[in-house]
Amino acid sequence: MFRQPNKAYLTSGSGTGKTEIEAFDNALLDAGIGNLNLIKVSSIFPKNCRFVEDHSISPGSVVPVVYSRKIDSDKGNLISSSVCVARSPDGIGVVCESSAKECEKESRNKSIKKAKRMLKSRGLKLKDLNLASDSIESEEVSCTVSALLLW
């Protein structure tokens, strides 16, 4: 079983490639997390967890992550992804992601709205929001990814 994380890192990136997996890998590399083994987790931000500006996680480490991604291969389409952390005054929070064929601002707004609703459904008040987002206009196969690492 994992211990409760006490550090969090928000990031985003985009990439292209000849295949979906190559575009996704390049987006992860652009986000600075391409050399980690990511385990997708659900949407609760732990109490007493603090945001850090950078991570110094060793390559190959297994790291819990909440992420959104969008992949597209139609040239000229704008795609975006975002992750929003909404925290309550006591520090616990929710994480919500969004991705679509839309501008980055729309993706950000959607993840913010969803995160606020998730807090409200838990009877929690909003203290602050933290976001990561990215967008890219499709060339060959393109991918955008936004992520929250928790460790």
Image (spheres, rainbow, N blue to C red):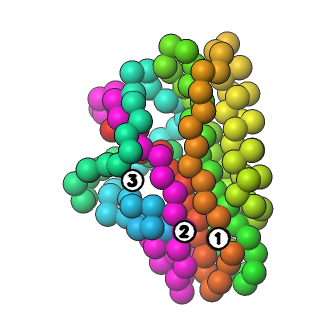
In the rendered structure, which amino acid carries the disc numbered 1?
Answer: Ile
Residue 38: give its label. 3
Q: Is residue 85 placed above or below 88 in the rendered structure? A: below
Say which of 70 and 10 sits in front: 10
Q: Which residues are magenta?
A: 1-26
- Tell me the element at label 1: strand
Q: Magenta includes 2?
A: yes
Rendering coords of residue 14 (x, y %) = 54, 68
Q: Secondary structure at mark 2?
A: strand
Q: Is residue 24 visible?
A: no
What residue does disc 2 label?
14
Seen as rendered, the residue at the extreme front is 53
Secondary element at image label 3:
strand
Q: Nearer the viewer, mark 2 or mark 3?
A: 2
Residue drawn at x 58%, y 70% is 143
Q: Residue at x 65, y 16 (%)?
A: 125
Distance in Å between CA atoms under marks 2 and 3: 17 Å
Q: Position of residue 150 (x, y in %)?
A: 39, 39
**Mark toward the start of the polypeptide (3 vs 1):** 3
Tally the marks: 3
For the residues labelled 2 and 3, say whether their Cβ atoms are less than 8 Å apart.
Answer: no
Residue 145 x/y as whole percent: 55, 60
Residue 41 visible in the displayed image? yes
* Residue at mark 3 to residue at mark 1: CA–CA distance: 22 Å
Q: Earlier in the sequence, mark 2 or mark 3?
A: 2
Q: Amino acid at mark 3?
A: Leu
- Is 120 included in the stretch rendered in magenta? no
**Left or right of residue 121, residue 86 in this image:** left
Q: Which amino acid lies under the numbered mark 2 shown in the image of this protein?
A: Ser
